[in-house]
Image (cartoon, grey):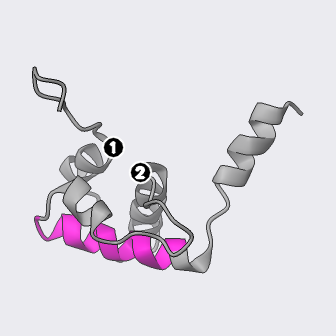
Amino acid sequence: MTDQNILWQKSRQYTNEQLRTASIVLDEIRSGTETMKAVRAHPLKEGGYIAKHMLVYIYRQQIKDRDYPADNSLLARIRMKPIRSLSGF
């Protein structure tokens, strides 16, 4: 296994805090809050923010557990990259 594969697998091991925070963020996005605003409102204790792959993981878990119906527009919003303006910001 390469170093990149090991790093990728390690980045996909979520702590309970990360999962709880991702669930909170996803609920805020579902209620209409802009994705990046919701993410930035909930920094992690160890620093940084919830990654979008965590949001996608929680979304898929909630669909699988039948907590919420599938919502393709929500999935698109949490996967979309932020768009820069012409000035670069």
Q: Residue at x 43, y 60 (%)?
A: 49
86 vs 61, left or right, is left
**Dot 2 lies on which element?**
helix
Q: Amino acid at mark 2?
A: Lys
* x, y percent for residue 62: 41, 70
Q: Kindly indicate the quadrant of the structure image that contains residue 89.
A: top left
The quadrant holding residue 63 is bottom left
Residue annotated with mark 2:
52
Of the numbered discs 1 and 2, the one sitting upstream in the chain is 2
- Labels 1 & 2 near each other (Cβ < 8 A): yes
Mark 1 packing: few (<14 Cα in 10 Å), some, or many (20+)?
Answer: some
Question: Helix, strand, or loop for circle 1?
Answer: helix
In the foreground, 89 or 61: 89
Determine which residue is flagged by label 1. Answer: 79
Residue 8 place in picture, x, y as percent: 69, 42
Foreground residue among 34 and 64: 34
The residue sitting at 45% across, 65% down in the picture is: 58
Magenta stretch encompasses residue 50: no
Check disc 1 and give the amino acid type.
Arg
Q: Which residues are magenta?
A: 18-32
